[in-house]
Image (spheres, grey):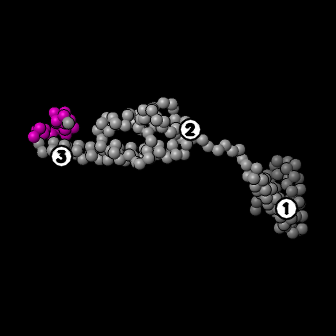
Amino acid sequence: MDQQKLRTLVFEKTGVRIDVDDPVFALVALNEAVLEEAVQRHVALIDAASLALAQQARLAGGLPAVHEGKAALDAAHEAPSNAAAAHGHAHAAETPPGYIPTPASGPVRPIATQSSPSIAPRELRLLGAAAAVAILSALIVLGGQAAFRSSGLTPEQTQALQRAEKLDKAIQKLDPKIRAELQAELQK
């Protein structure tokens, strides 16, 4: 923690001058210590989880097993004896039992999965049956609409509409002056 740099930063941002003996620096030091401890705990938890995940991957056949005589590396790709020292952590002893570090040689191979066709024959049959039911339902609905559809007009109303259409055609053939007078009379 560079106290001069912090003093300058506080002055630039707030305009307040603080001394190197100010109690605020004690709070900064306390904050650093608490933060460092929290970071170490989280790194230890993450390392333990990654070791457990690597072990599960090995058991599932996704990672190769460690062979004797080869130098083993941990998740950080450092020798296990140097891993804790390189990170400054004391969590190396927290490794789960049965953990075998990743070997130094060769890339990690992918986990084998089953290959299956995109749509199974049974699914095709079900899809066909569903399509047939949908088409049949649509035909039944359309047939029902056609069978029960009625205009709702009586024969007299239908005849009146036909006469009105004939009159409209006849009016369109008249002289524009007479047509205007006739339409004005019809509006009344």
Where does the image place residue 154, in percent across and percent down from the top left? 87, 69
Q: Secondary structure at mark 2?
A: loop
Residue 115 location (% of width, % of height) = 66, 43
Question: Which residues fall within the magenta stretch?
Answer: 2-21
Residue at 44% across, 41% down:
100
Query: Dot 3: within a 10 Å radius of its alpha carbon, few (fewer than 14), some, or many (20 or more) residues?
Result: few
Q: Is residue 119 visible?
A: yes
Labelled pair 3, 1 in contact (Cβ < 8 Å): no
| Amino acid type, residue under disc 1 in the picture | Gly
Question: Around disc 1, counting alpha carbons within 10 Å, would you say few (fewer than 14), some (14 to 19), or many (20 or more)?
Answer: few
Q: Earlier in the sequence, mark 3 or mark 1?
A: 3
Question: Distance of mark 2 from mark 3, alpha carbons?
Answer: 49 Å
User: Can you say whether 63 is above or below 180 in the image?
Assistant: above
User: Which picture quadrant has residue 187?
Assistant: bottom right
Residue 110 is labelled as 2
Question: Which quadrant of the figure contains the N terminus?
Answer: top left
- The question of residue 183 being in magenta is answered with no
Q: Quadrant of residue 17?
A: top left
**Residue depicted at x 57% and y 41%:** 111
Q: Nearer the viewer, residue 98 or 141?
A: 98
Per the image, the residue denoted by label 3 is 27
Q: Which is the main secondary structure of the residues drawn in magenta?
A: helix
Residue at the spot of label 1: 143
- How far is the residue under mark 3 from the one under mark 1? 83 Å
- The answer to whether residue 156 is above or below residue 46 is below
Secondary element at tag 3: helix
- Density class for disc 2 (Cα within 10 Å; few <14, some 14-19, many ≥20) is few
How far is disc 1 from disc 2 in space, using C-alphas?
57 Å
- Asked whether 20 falls inside the magenta stretch, the response is yes
